[in-house]
Amino acid sequence: MYDLIVIGSGPGGYVAAIRAAQLGLKTAIIEKYDTLGGTCLNVGCIPSKALLDSSEHYHNAAHSFKNHGIDLKDLKVNFKQMIQRKREVVKQNVDGIQYLMKKNKIDVIQGLGSFKDKNTVLVTKKDKKTEELSGKHILIATGSKPGSLPFITLDKERIITSTEALELKEVPKHLIIIGGGVIGLELGSVYARLGAKVSVVEYLDSIIPTMDRTMGKELQKSLKKLGMEFYLKHKVTGVERKGKEVTVTALNPKEETISLKGDYALVSIGRKPYTEGLNVEAAGVKVNDKGQVEVDDQLKTSTPSIYAIGDVVKGAMLAHKAEEEGVFVAEQIAGQKPHINYLLIPGVVYTWPEVASVGYTEEQLKESGKKYKTGKFPFMASGRARASGDVDGVVKVLADAETDEILGVHMIGPRTADMIAEAVVAMEYRASAEDIARMSHAHPTYTEVFREACLAATDNRALHV
Ligand code: FAD
C-alpha cells in the first residue's frame, strides 16, 4: 500500500512525488507517455523556450549584429538543426526527471491510470497488461490538452495546435494564429523571427487580455515591429484547408466577413483540463462543467483522500502554479500546514521584450474601488537597456494610495521574466514601494528600472527621467 499514488508526471505530479518522498512517504507515479515531465517538459514550456532562444539568436544576428559592429556573411536558418536541438534539450530535461525519481526512490509505472475505487488505481500498460496499485492517498495531476472550436478540424499537419507547432518540418510562409494569448504569441514570435508572415486573430480587443492592459498595448507595438499583424475584435468563423492552403474566415467588428490565406493555422485559444480515461466516477470524484476536477481550498476533491492539482483544477495554467500545489499536497499529507498565496504566482510571456506580472492589475484595482497610485519607468531611460539595445518596454508599479504597499507589478522589457522575482519577494514580505526605492540596485542593470518605477510610485521622484 502506497502512502501516495500520483497520476500524471507533469510539473505538478513529479514535484509532488519528490516532496512526498523527501517527507518519507512511500510514493508511486503513473505516466501514460514514455517520457516523464508532462506537457511542460515535452510539448510546452521547455521546447517553446528552446525555439524562442534559437530564433532570437537568429533574429539578433540578422537585425542587430551589424549595429553592434559585427558583420556576418551568408547567415541562414538551419531549421532542421533548430528542431533537433530543441529535441535534445527536451531529452536532457525528461531524462533528468527519470533520474530524480530514481534518486528519491519513487516507483515509476508507465501506463494509463484509471480509478477502480477510491483507494485503487488500475494501470493499463502499452502491451494491454494491467497492474493494480493501492494507496492511502491519490493525487490527480493529469494536466490539460489544447482546446479548439467545434467547427475546426485539427488535421495536425496544417491546422495545428502548439504541440505540432513545436515540431514543424519547415518555417511557414504565412502562419495564421487563432488566439492572441501567451502560447500563440510565443510561437508566433518564433516563426516571425525566422521570416514567416504571422497574423494573429483575437476575439477580444487586446492581446494577452488577462494581463494588465498596458502590457498588451506595449507588447503589440513591439510585435508589430517584428512584422506581426493583428486582427483584434475578430471572431473566427471558419478554418478550411485545401492542399497546402489554409483559409481562416472571421467576422470583423463591423460584422463583415474577412478571410486570411496562409499555409498553416495555429489554434491557440486556450487549453482544457484532461481527465479522459481516468474513470473518476468510480472514486466519487466530481468534475465540473468546465471539465475541471473540483477541489476545496486544501486541494481535496469530493473524495477527501484524493487530491487534484495543476492544469486539471481551477486557476492559472502555469507550471510553477502546478509545482506549488504539488508541494502543498505532499506536505499536507505528511501532516504539515502549508500555504499558497495565489495572488503572488507570477505570469510571464517569453516574447521579446518579455512580459511579467504579479499581483493585481490596474483594471482589477479600479473595479474593486481600491485607492492606488502608479509609478512607471521606461527601459528607454535605462543605461543598461541602451547598452544592450533593448529599449522597448516599461515597468509599472501599483501601490496602495495610503500605505504605499505594493499591490501589483507589471513589466515589459528585457529579462523581465527573471526580474519579476524581486517583485514577488517584495510583495510576499508586504514591502512598500519606498522600501524597494531605498534598496541599492546594481548599476547598470535592468533591475534599476523596477527601482525607478518604485521611486515614481512613492512620491513621483524617479531619478533618471
Ligand atoms: P501536465 O504537464 O499537462 O502533465 C500531465 C501529465 O499527466 C501528462 O504527462 C499526461 O500524459 C499524464 N496523464 C494524463 N492522464 C493520465 C492518466 N490517466 N494516466 C497516466 N498519466 C496521465 N507554463 C509555464 O509556467 N511557463 C511556460 O513557459 C509555459 N509554456 C508553455 C508553452 C506551451 C506551448 C504550452 C502548451 C504550455 C506552457 N505552459 C507554461 C503551461 C504548462 O505546460 C502547464 O501549466 C503545466 O505543464 C501543467 O502541469 P500539470 O502537472 O498540471 O500537467
Image (cartoon, rainbow, N blue to C red):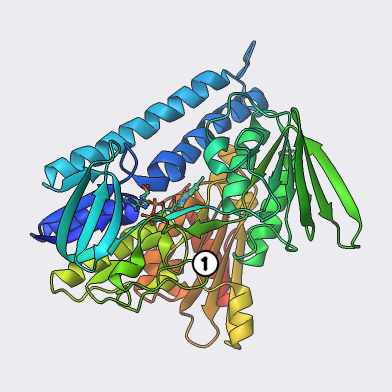
Vertical side of 448 occupied by 84: above or below:
above
- The reply to whether residue 353 is in sight is no
Q: Quadrant of residue 126?
A: top left
Nearest the viewer among 39 and 383 is: 39
Specify the amino acid type for callout 1. Val
From the viewer's perspective, tell me whether residue 262 is left or right of residue 337: right
- Across and down, in percent, residue 200 comes to 73, 47
Vertical side of 193 occupied by 444: above or below:
below
- Across and down, in percent, residue 228 comes to 74, 42
Q: Which residue is drawn at 59% across and 41% down?
A: 187
Nearest the viewer among 93 and 137 is: 137
Q: In which quarter of the image is the N terminus?
A: bottom left
Vertical side of 379 occupied by 302: above or below:
below
From the viewer's perspective, tell me whether residue 77 is left or right of residue 232: left
From the viewer's perspective, tell me whether residue 330 is left or right of residue 220: left
Q: How crowded is mark 1: few (under 14 residues within 10 Å), some or many (20 or more)?
A: many
Q: Residue at x 16, y 55 (%)?
A: 133
Q: Which residue is drawn at 45% across and 41% down?
A: 43
Nearest the viewer among 150 and 122 is: 122
Identify the residue under disc 1.
409
Farthest-out residue, top: 74
- Across and down, in percent, residue 60 comes to 60, 29
Q: Which residue is drawn at 20% across and 45% down?
A: 108
- The reply to whether residue 26 is in sight is yes
Q: Quadrant of residue 139?
A: bottom left
Q: Quadrant of the C terminus?
A: bottom right
